Image (cartoon, rainbow, N blue to C red):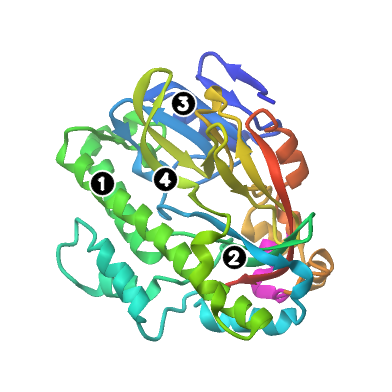
Amino acid sequence: MMRGMDQKSRIKCWAPDLDLPTQQQIQDVASLPIIYRHVAVMPDAHLGKGSTVGTVIASLGHIIPAAVGVDIGCGMAAVRLPFPADKLKKFKELRCSIERSVPTGRDDNREISVRVGSAFQSLGLPPSIPYEDKLTKKAVYQLGSLGSGNHFIEVCADTEGGAWIMLHSGSRNIGKQLAEKHIDAAKGRFKERLESLPHPDLAYLEEETVEFEAYVRDLLWAQQFAKLNRKEMLLRVLKDVSHHVYGDARLMSELDSFFQVNAHHNYCQKEVHFGKEVWLTRKGAVSARENEFGIIPGSMGAKSFIVRGLGNFESFHSCSHGAGRRMSRNEARRRYSEKDLRKQTEGVECRKDRAVVDEIPSAYHDIDRVMENQKDLVEPVYELKQLLCVKGA
C-alpha cells in the first residue's frame, strides 16, 4: 500500500520505516530540478551510493549516472525446470559442480568458449572503447561469471513442487568502469557548481550534450552485457542440473521453451509515464507493468517470489527488487557469527563460513512484510524456497 506523499519534496513511498539518513537521501534526490512529478520509493528501500537503493526516478531529458549506479544492468534471471524438485538429491555435489562451472568472487573464465566468444562478438565493443584493450579482454573473460556481494545462484522449489534455477548478477567489472567514467564526466559538467547539488554524486547529464550521448551508448551496451551474462550462467547451471538429473546436457538446448524471466533492476531507459516520454531510472527496482513478470528474491535462506505486475502508475509501473538490507555489511559481520549463519540457513546447501556472514538472512528485511507493503504493485505467482545457494565471497 502507498504510505503517503510529501508534497514539498515530491515523494511517494511504499516503505513504512525508513531511517533518517535514507529519508534525507531521498529528499535530496527529490529536490533536484530535473525530477519529473515525484520519486517513487519501493518497500525495500535503504541507503545507497548516489541515491537510495529502491527508488524510481523520472526526469525529462536528464540522467543521474550515479543513481543508475556502478553495476549497470544488475538484475535477476529465473527459469522453471521441466521436472519436480524431488528429482534433485545430492545438493552438495550439485553445488560444487555449479561452483566449478561458474566463476565466483573475483574469478574469471580460464578460457573462452565458442559460445561466449560468439555472444561477446555479437554485442560488439563498448562504444566509448573503440578498440580491444585490457578492459574489454577482462569483460569477455567475465561473461558468464557471478561476482560477489549479494550476487547468487540458487536452485529452488516452488510450493507446487516445481524446480527452479534463479540467479542474480550484473555487468561485472566493465559496467563498473564505464559507470565511474561517466559519473566523473557528470561531476565535471558541474565543476565549480558542485556545491549547488545536495551531494556531488547527484550530478546529472543533459540530453543533446556530448557527455549525455556517450553515457547512454555505454549504458545500453552494459545493460545488454549484463543480460547476456545472466543467460550464459543459466546455460551453465542448466548443464550441471541436467547432468545431475538425466546424465546428459539435454536441458541446455531446451532453455527457450521453459518459462523464464531475465530482468534488470539497476538501469535506465526511455519510457512514457503520465503522458510524457521520460528517462526512467530504476535503482534497485523492477519494472512491473500490468501482467509483466518479475522476480523479487528474499535473503539467503528465505523464500522468494515470481510476481506479475499490476501496472500501478504512481510507482511508474515498478516494484521492489528484493527484501532490502536493514543493516550494513560491516554491522552484520559485527553482530553475527558463523554459528548464527548455520542456524539461519538450516536446510539450505550453501557456504556457511565467515566470508558470507554479511549475507545472513537477519541482515535483510522480512520478505513477507515487503510483499505486503507492495500488494498494490504486484501479485505473487510462484513462491520459491532455496534448496541450494551459491555465493562468491
Find the distance from the CA under tag 1 to the CA under tag 3.
22 Å
Q: Which of marks 2 and 3 precedes in the sequence?
A: 3
Q: Which residue is mark 1?
A: 215
Name the amino acid type tagged 3.
Ala
Q: Which of marks 3 and 1 precedes in the sequence?
A: 3
- Within 10 Å of disc 1 (Cα), the crowding (few <14, some 14-19, many 20+) is many
Residue 382 visible in rendering? yes
Horizontally, residue 154 falls left or right of residue 269, namely right
Find the distance from the CA under tag 2 to the CA under tag 1.
28 Å
Q: Which of marks 4 and 1 precedes in the sequence?
A: 1
Q: Is 387 located above or below residue 227 in the figure?
A: below
Horizontally, residue 79 falls left or right of residue 224, namely right
Magenta stretch containing residue 355, yes or no?
Answer: yes
Labels 2 and 1 touching (C-beta < 8 A): no
Q: Could you say which is closer to the camera, residue 91 or residue 302?
A: 91
Residue at position x 75%, y 66% in the image: 84
Q: Residue 30 got which mark?
A: 3
Q: Could you say which is closer to the camera, residue 199 or residue 306?
A: 306
Q: Which residue is mark 4?
A: 267
Where's the C terminus, which quadrant?
bottom right
- Secondary structure type for disc 2: strand
Labels 1 and 4 touching (C-beta < 8 A): no
Measured as percent of width and height from the top left, residue 75 is found at: 50, 53
| Magenta highlight range | 350-360
Name the amino acid type tagged 1.
Tyr
Residue at position x 35%, y 82% in the image: 112
Q: Which residue is mark 2?
A: 152
Q: Which of marks 4 and 2 precedes in the sequence?
A: 2
Q: Could you say which is closer to the camera, residue 129 or residue 257?
A: 257
Q: Which of marks 1 and 2 precedes in the sequence?
A: 2
Measured as percent of width and height from the top left, residue 25 is found at: 52, 35
